[in-house]
Image (cartoon, grey):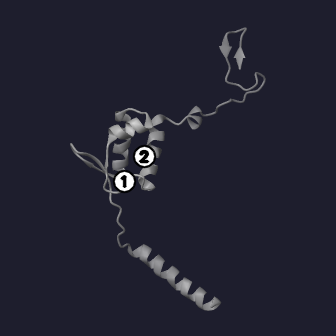
Amino acid sequence: MVDIKNNTISLYTDSNKNEFVNKKIGDNFPNLEDQVYKIIKDKIIWHKIKMGERIIDKKLAEELGVSRSMVRQVLAILAKEELLIMVPRNGFYIREITFCYNPVLWDIVVTFNKIYRVTISIYA
């Protein structure tokens, strides 16, 4: 609300109430780095960038309309999360995702398999 008499801008919806229009401005306007991070991570997860492929920061920066340094910052974060491999003086590559044997998960799979067989035998 704009108060012309006092040349001030009030953040209240109504001058008689104490309710803010925007309680947290950051919730409505996420920063640019978070937006770029989400876009690149989604591309990796949904295989729009293939595993093992080299990521060219210049190409991504042009595509997203941001600076190369912003893209490099996001790629460094994704490398720390182990979605990317950083090769010095060569760039970033998408990490190959492999499935390894995990005894706990294997026990869960075996248990579900047994439940499935019992359920099929009951309804067959």
Residue at 33% over, 49% down: 79
Q: Which residue is mark 2?
A: 40
Instruction: Please tell me which residue lies in front, 19 or 72.
Output: 72
Q: Quadrant of residue 77?
A: top left
Q: Which residue type does callout 2 highlight?
A: Ile
- Report, in whole angstroms, how far the alpha carbon at label 1 lies from the one at label 2: 11 Å
Q: Tell me where residue 4 appears, x and y as whole percent.
A: 71, 10
Marked residue nearer the N-terminal end (1 or 2) = 2
Q: Tell me where residue 39 appears, x and y as whole percent.
A: 46, 45
Q: Tell me where residue 50 appears, x and y as whole percent.
A: 36, 55
Q: Which residue is mark 1?
A: 83
Q: Quadrant of residue 82?
A: bottom left
Secondary element type, mark 2 = helix
Spot the residue most to the right.
Answer: 16
Q: Which residue type does callout 1 highlight?
A: Leu
Instruction: Please tell me which residue lies in front, 54 or 32.
Output: 54
Instruction: Please tell me which residue lies in front, 115 or 91.
Output: 91
Secondary element type, mark 1 = loop
Disc 2 packing (10 Å; few <14; some 14–19; many ≥20): some
Whether residue 31 is situated above or below residue 120 in the rendered picture: above
Instruction: Please tell me which residue lies in front, 63 or 71.
Output: 63
Instruction: Identify the image quadrant of the C terminus.
Output: bottom right
Spot the residue most to the top.
Answer: 5
Q: Tell me where residue 65 appears, x and y as whole percent.
A: 43, 34
Residue at 64% over, 31% down: 22
Q: Is residue 73 left or right of residue 3?
A: left
Of badges 1 and 2, the one in the foreground is 2
Residue at 44% over, 43% down: 37
